[in-house]
Image (spheres, rainbow, N blue to C red):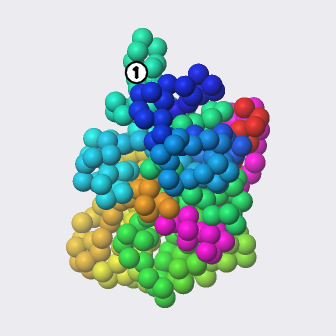
Amino acid sequence: MHAVYEKHTVPWVHISPALLTRFLLLGHTSVCACVCICACPEIGGVVEAVGDAVTKYKVGDKVGVGCFVDSCRSCSMCKCGEQNYCRTGMVGTYNATEKYAHCPGYGNGADQKPAPTYGGYSKDVVVHEDFVCGIPDNLDLAAATPLLCAGITVYSPMAHYGLKKGQRLAVAGLGGLGHMAVKFGLAMGCTVTVLSRGLSKKEEAINRLGATAFIDVTDSEAVAAARESFDMIVNCIPAEHDLGLYLGMVDINGTMAVVGASPSPLPLNMFSIIARRKSIVGSMIGGIKETQEMLDFCGKHNIVCDIEMIDAKAINEAYERAVNSDVRYRFVIDTATL
Ligand SMILES: [Zn+2]
């Protein structure tokens, strides 16, 4: 699926070349350790060339590709624009393998096997236009790039589960995902409370990000005072934690949307959801349709991610720092340095 350097730019014969968008990465790819095991590969760039039948983009457009570059394109989920939940599986942008014969270059790997995908760690990329999103002109390309992963990961459950203006949102875990949930919640007109262990992130949450309130979850009095006070908690915590403590702060009929992956299963007292009709829901990135909606929302409200730009040669150090949460909040690689 991915064109790495020049060698894959010709075999557009595997699919009508007219159906492809090719863009040269003048742009950026960001490093994320949101689930601790992957370096997410979302890509922001500028369209360098398009096939004849491309209708959505033209040369020079600012565009992005999220965590996947293809899917079966025919199942019920793909047909409604939720390719992230493709019934036979999406093709990841990075460290995946071509899966469908309609992938350009399918079978062009070693020994004619499906080729691997290299994500944003590439000089240029070829993607079907249906898997490309437009980045609003007013957004900085580098800072907008992680929206394609961190941004959509938290935006999707907030939108899908119907968070409304005036509601009370809490964000558990203030990292790459959490800081975006704070920005979206405020832009949606919600009150936003950051839940964090200790007070080290309080100043950042309140003064820099503009959160409405901050609760140190190790302070049992503060937690008790917040009992059943949130309509939704976006749970971004990528580590083991006490689900019951957080569910206690979800209001009756409220929702905890989980987007952070604990490395091990978490115990749950069923009565913490049964007794007050609470929901625990999961969500993983978003489909193309919703990702575009999120980007348009960001354009309207001038929302981008907080980033640190790095050279490609600093990627190993950046990965270590990302795993250790030592970044505010995403590294973005300038691919001109690849
Ligand atoms: Zn599908």
In magenta segment, residue 103:
no
Q: Quadrant of the rendered structure where residue 179 is?
A: bottom right
Q: Horizontally, is 29 left or right of 265 in the view?
A: right
Q: Is residue 61 above or below residue 11?
A: below
In magenta segment, residue 302:
yes
Q: Residue at x 66, y 71 (%)?
A: 302
Q: Residue at x 45, y 42 (%)?
A: 19
Query: Which secondary structure is most common in the magenta stretch?
Result: helix
Q: How many marks?
A: 1
110 or 264, nearer to the observer: 110
In the image, residue 167 lies at what x, y percent? 46, 85
In the image, residue 251 lies at what x, y percent? 37, 81
Q: Is residue 253 above or below residue 40?
A: below
Quadrant of the rendering where the C terminus is positioned: top right
Specify few, some or many for label 1: CA neighbours under 10 Å numbering under 14, 14-19, or 20 or more.
some
> Is residue 64 at least partly visible in the picture?
yes
Q: Quadrant of the rendered structure where residue 123 is?
A: top right
> Is residue 314 at least partly visible in the picture?
no
Q: Residue at x 49, y 88 (%)?
A: 166
Q: Horizontally, is 32 left or right of 257 in the view?
A: right
In the rendered image, which residue does mark 1 sit on? Answer: 107
Three-letter amino acid code at the position of disc 1: Gly
- Secondary element at tag 1: loop
Q: Is residue 19 above or below residue 140?
A: above
Q: Is residue 165 above or below residue 219?
A: below
- What is the magenta range? 293-320
In the image, residue 68 lies at what x, y percent? 46, 44
